[in-house]
């Protein structure tokens, strides 16, 4: 028995010495400090671009503190692993980062983003956290360059400058390929062009000119009926355009070519015609009665007008400007009556037609064709 006592005694001394060594090791203070720190919960890191290597990315840290202790310092370490030695993700650059916004209590911010993979913000004059839900957004960060990989942000708040932690959390984020998820789609060009007739009543008008009672147009006809000398008749149609053409559209008006000298807009037989009005598309004028004294030479006029006050060529409001409604004579070449410089949805423009003859105009049944053409520009 006596021979065993010294061995026990020596063993006890050895155990005490071992404990003393552990207690004086610097690692012990680190472990004690982390054990006392609370957890940032819930916590997450939001990135606004998951493409590997993408620049100018915004990183938004969202977490809730466990206490209202004043935060003196916030440090975020970006690592390849959730725990253990922290190796900064390859290709990640945060040296040019900046705080866009944060709600940490206190005034003054000093940021240290000197090493890639580390964000440190020190609050100059900290204050107690009245709102435990903390938001802080960093801009100007370049994502890690390793595609299809998960990375980790180790977040720690301190009550001083990096010695006494308050709360900690480790959150994950991932980056995908340089194109992230490539999305492709095709949009076909579209154009819808329709013409609608307008009832010929005194309450309807075109470009401030009242429509003639009883002259009701359809989508395909303008039936002026019987003309009386020195009594003009007015009809109208609505044209509606829908197109996704990025440069918009143009609608032109013309009359079809006839097998007759001068190609007048309306003809009767082989010799009689109603001429185009004297105003032009470039310079439309108020309506004036035909004053010709020789049959078929300015003894009848046919013209058109438009309510589009924003034409794309020439003077945009030339048909609608002050001084009364303006009219132009049609030609066999298309001339602008409506347009837009961008895509439109159900844009409607009213087009008007006027006809008048004098006492010299030969009798007959006159006919012609108005041609409206819509051209989108993509």
Image: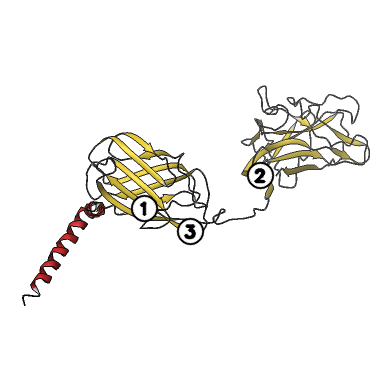
Q: Residue furthest top?
A: 323
**SS of the residue under disc 2:** strand
Dot 2 corresponds to which residue? 240
Q: Could you give the CA–CA distance between mark 3 and mark 2, rounded to whole angstroms?
A: 53 Å
Which residue matches tag 3?
A: 149
Q: Nearer the viewer, mark 3 or mark 2?
A: 3
Residue 248 picture location, percent across and down: 67, 41
- Which residue is found at the position 10% from the left and 70% from the top? 6
User: What residue sits 20% from the left and 53% below the top?
Assistant: 24
Which residue is tagged 1? 44
User: Which of the colour schemes (rainbow, by chain, secondary structure, one colour) is used?
Assistant: secondary structure
Between 206 and 365, the one lying in front of the other is 206
Of labels 1 and 3, earlier in sequence is 1
Horizontal placement of 104 versus 292: left or right?
left
Dot 1, crowdedness within 10 Å: few (<14), some or many (≥20)? some
* The quadrant where residue 42 appears: bottom left
189 horizontally vs 66: left or right:
right
Mark 1 vs mark 2: in front: 1
């Amino acid at each position: 028995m006596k021979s065993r006592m010294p061995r026990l005694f020596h063993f006890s001394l050895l155990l005490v010495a071992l404990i003393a060594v552990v207690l004086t090791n610097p690692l012990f203070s680190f472990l004690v400090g982390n054990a006392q720190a609370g957890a940032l919960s819930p916590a997450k890191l939001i990135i606004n671009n998951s493409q590997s290597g993408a620049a100018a990315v915004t990183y938004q840290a969202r977490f809730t503190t466990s206490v209202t202790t004043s935060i003196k310092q916030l440090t975020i370490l970006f690592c390849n692993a959730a725990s253990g030695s922290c190796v900064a993700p390859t290709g990640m650059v945060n040296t040019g980062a900046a705080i866009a916004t944060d709600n940490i209590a206190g005034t003054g911010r000093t940021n240290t983003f000197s090493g890639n993979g580390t964000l440190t913000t020190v609050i100059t004059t900290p204050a107690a956290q009245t709102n435990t839900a903390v938001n802080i957004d960093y801009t100007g960060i370049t994502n890690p360059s390793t595609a299809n990989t998960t990375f980790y942000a180790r977040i720690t708040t301190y009550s001083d400058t990096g010695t006494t932690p308050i709360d900690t959390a480790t959150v994950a984020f991932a980056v995908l390929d340089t194109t992230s998820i490539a999305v492709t789609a095709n949009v076909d060009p579209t154009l819808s062009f329709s013409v609608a007739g307008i009832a010929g009543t005194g309450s309807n008008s075109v470009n401030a000119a009242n429509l003639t009672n009883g002259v009701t147009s359809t989508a395909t006809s303008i039936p002026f009926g019987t003309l009386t000398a020195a009594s003009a008749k007015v009809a109208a149609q609505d044209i509606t355009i829908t197109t996704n053409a990025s440069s918009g559209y143009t609608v032109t008006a013309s009359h079809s070519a006839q097998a007759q000298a001068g190609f007048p807009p309306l003809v009767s037989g082989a010799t009689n015609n109603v001429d185009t009005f004297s105003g032009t598309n470039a310079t439309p004028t108020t309506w004036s009665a035909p004053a010709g004294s020789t049959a078929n030479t300015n003894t009848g006029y046919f013209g058109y007008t438009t309510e589009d006050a924003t034409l794309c060529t020439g003077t945009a409001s030339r048909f609608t400007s002050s001084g009364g409604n303006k009219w132009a004579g049609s030609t066999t070449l298309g001339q602008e009556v409506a347009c837009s410089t961008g895509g439109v949805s159900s844009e409607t423009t009213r087009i008007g037609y006027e006809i008048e003859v004098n006492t010299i105009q030969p009798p007959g049944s006159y006919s012609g064709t108005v041609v409206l053409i819509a051209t989108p520009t993509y």
